Amino acid sequence: MSTLLRPPPGRSSQAPIENLLELTQLSDIDPDLFTNTRPLWTPPGARGIFGGAAIAQTLSAAQKTVPRDFTVHSMHCYFVLAGSADIPIIYHVERVRSGKSFATRTVQARQRGKVIFTTTMSFVRQNSAGDKLVEHAYPMPDVPGPVEDMDDLDVSGGTQGPFQSQRLDIENNDSEHAHVKKCRQWVKARGIISPEGGHEAHLSAIAYMSDSYFVGTVARVHKLWRYSTLRESKHKSTIDEDVLKKLLAMDDVELKRLNIVDEADLDRIRRLKNGETAVEDPIPEIGMMVSLDHTIYFHNPRTFRADEWIFTEMETPWAGDGRGVVHQRMYTQDGVLIATCVQEGVVRLRQTESKL
C-alpha cells in the first residue's frame, strides 16, 4: 500500500491540502521520524510523485521540531530520485542547530532505504531583528485579478486537486528573447485552512503550490511541445498519451478554456488534427523535463493565507547544457511579496533516432 499505516478518514474541518500533506509521527521508533499519512499524487506522464509534496512534507516535518516562535525563512532542496506513490515515504529530521535566533534542520525523505529528496531549512525567531529594520521589496506588477468561481480545467483529474489555479497570458510572449518573457498565474489552496493548522499549514501549502508549472516555464517561453506524439519509443513521454488523446478530442472552444494549453500548443493540436505528423512539425518536442533543485525564501511568513489568492510570476534567466533555471515571486492579492523561489531542472529535447 502507499502509506505505512492505514490512512484515517479525511477531516472535514481541514482544507484538502491539509489532509493531503498530513504526516504521521513515528514516535515509538524515533520522535524525529515521520511518514506520509495519505497516498501522494503522481502527475500524468511524470516519473514520480509531484515534487511539491516532498517539499511541503519535509517542511511540515521540520516545523514540528522547532519552538512555536521560530518560523522558516529559507529552504534549499534537492530532488535525488523519483519518489514512488506505491510505497510510503519516511522523513528523518536532523536537528543540526538550535540557537537563540536561528535554528537549522535537515530532512531526508527515504524510500527502499535510499534518499529520494533532501532539504536544509533555516528558522528564525520572531522579532529577533529589533525595532529598526532595513526593508524593501520587488513590487507586484499590475495584472488582471483572479476570477472567483472559475478554475483551470485539468484533463487528467477534473478540478478536485488540493489547490486552484488560473493562468494568465505570458508577458512579452511575442518577443524572440526567452529571458524577457514572464509566466503568471493565480493560485490558492482549495477550501479553508483550519485554525488548528496555524501559520505552519499556510507555509506548507505555498511550498506545495510553488512547484506548480515551475520548471515548465522554460518549455513555455520557448514554445516547446510538451505532449508526446510518439507511440513507440524507449523514451518516457513527458505527458501520457491519454492526455494527448483527450486534447485531440476537444474543439477549439474547449481547448481555449483549458489553461494548461498555450497558444503554441493550440496551434500544434490543430495541425495534428489535420493529419500533420510530429516529423513534419518544426517545433522541438520535450523529451525529458524534471526538477533538480528547489529553493524558497519566505518573506512575511505569518501575514498571509494560502487559501486566499496568491499571484506568482516566473521567468527564466538561462537555459543550456540540458538544464534550465527559473525564478519565481509569490505575492498576496494586495501586493505583499511572500516568497522568492528558484528552481533548476533537466530540460532535454527529444532527439531524432539518427542522433541516438
Image: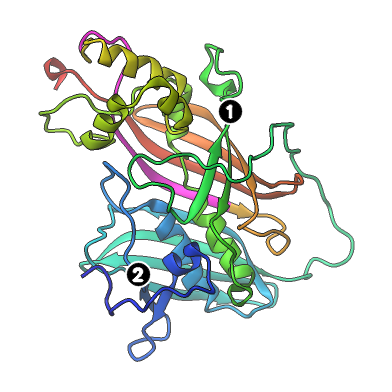
* Residue type (three-letter) at the residue carrying disc 2: Arg
- Residue 151, disc: none
Residue shown at the point (52%, 11%) measured from the top left: 176
* Residue type (three-letter) at the residue carrying disc 1: Lys
Magenta span contains residue 284: yes
Q: Which residue is mark 2?
A: 38
Q: Quadrant of residue 10?
A: bottom left
**Please, which residue is most extreme toward the right here?**
132
Left or right side of 14 for 268: left
Position of residue 164 measured from the top left corner of the image (x, y, whole percent)? 52, 48
Left or right side of 36 for 150: right
Residue shown at the point (36%, 22%) measured from the top left: 251
Magenta span contains residue 287: yes
What distance separates the C-alpha of mark 2 from that of mark 1? 35 Å
Do labels 2 and 1 touch, CB within 8 Å? no
In-front residue for pair 251/197: 251
In-front residue for pair 8/84: 8
Position of residue 238 measured from the top left corner of the image (x, y, whole percent)? 28, 35
- Mark in front: 2 vs 1: 2
Q: Which residue is mark 1?
A: 182
Residue shown at the point (20%, 70%) measured from the top left: 1
